[in-house]
Image (tube, coloured by chain):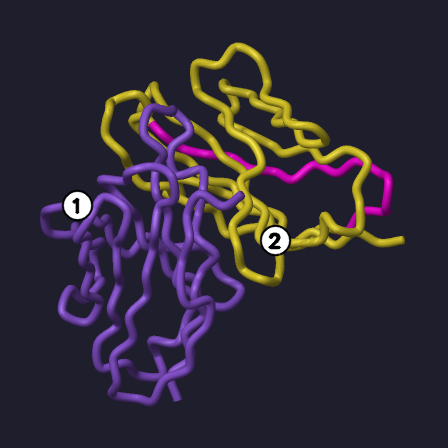
Amino acid sequence: AQKITQTQPGMFVQEKEAVTLDCTYDTSDPSYGLFWYKQPSSGEMIFLIYQGSYDQQNATEGRYSLNFQKARKSANLVISASQLGDSAMYFCAMREGVGTGTASKLTFGTGTRLQVTL
Amino acid sequence: GAVVSQHPSWVICKSGTSVKIECRSLDFQATTMFWYRQFPKQSLMLMATSNEGSKATYEQGVEKDKFLINHASLTLSTLTVTSAHPEDSSFYICSAPIPGTLISEAFFGQGTRLTVV
């Protein structure tokens, strides 16, 4: 089974509108972290937002917010007031075993390509 | 500014030659670094975990002898693609966890686009 699933290969949004990028995950580990990254055409991975499995509130970072629904195992990214510069690939990722003191790998979804239009 | 620096950002090499990619942590010590590979229009796949002072841990299906990893210091890990072939052409990117934070692996290097001709 896929650990991270992003069902939207591509999304379009008009400038200044909000958009939601979907992400569902699968883990039996009670301690995990969820990440969203932006990858522009240059290839760099830009960290956007993080949500820990024990966090009570949804994470927010400026125009980015994470709609964390633990029971549904979903961690959707909401981008408000979209800008042309938001056009990029967006990856959802998960790290299991958070807080164990050892670094562990990130598992990535297949990504969603967001295109912001005028 | 960037906390993880990767070099070179792109490289073209002839088939059969070797290429070395460097990943440096800036302003912090990284006992562990991660190397990922990304084919065009695909996701990032972990290749190996680089451990300072010990052997790297490779993911299933990754050839250890082809992708040599050296983590000689607390701030530098290198990935050497040996006897490169066109099928090794890909985007390689490293990540270094920042100690003392739950948000580990939050920062990546700039990536290296390798083209083997």
- Between B31 and A46, the one nearer to me in the picture: B31
Residue at figure coordinates x 55%, y 51% from the top left:
A111
The picture places residue B111, in percent across and down from the top left corner, at 45, 60
Rendered shade, chain A? yellow
What is the magenta range?
A: A12-27
Which residue is the extreme one toward the left? B54
Membership of A3 in magenta stretch: no
The picture places residue B41, in percent across and down from the top left corner, at 53, 64
Where A39 sits versus A28, above or below?
A: below
Res. B52 mark: 1
Q: Residues within 10 Å of mark 2 (few under 14, many from 20)?
A: many
Helix, strand or loop for disc 2: strand
**Residue B63 placement: quadrant:** bottom left
Where A55 sits versus B114, above or below?
A: above
Residue at figure coordinates x 60%, y 32% from the top left:
A76
Which residue is the extreme one toward the top? A56
Quadrant housing the C terminus of chain B: bottom left
The picture places residue A90, in percent across and down from the top left corner, at 59, 47
Drawn side of residue B67 relative to residue B94, left or right = left
Q: Which residue is mark 2?
A: A89
- Between A67 and B35, the one nearer to me in the picture: B35
Write down the chain letter for disc 2: A
Cα–Cα gap, marks 2 and 1: 32 Å
Q: Amino acid at mark 1?
A: Glu
Rendered shade, chain B? purple
Drawn side of residue B71 relative to residue A91, left or right = left
Write down the chain letter for disc 1: B
Helix, strand or loop for disc 1: loop
Membership of A24 in magenta stretch: yes
The picture places residue B92, in percent across and down from the top left corner, at 39, 63
Residue at figure coordinates x 30%, y 89% from the top left:
B15
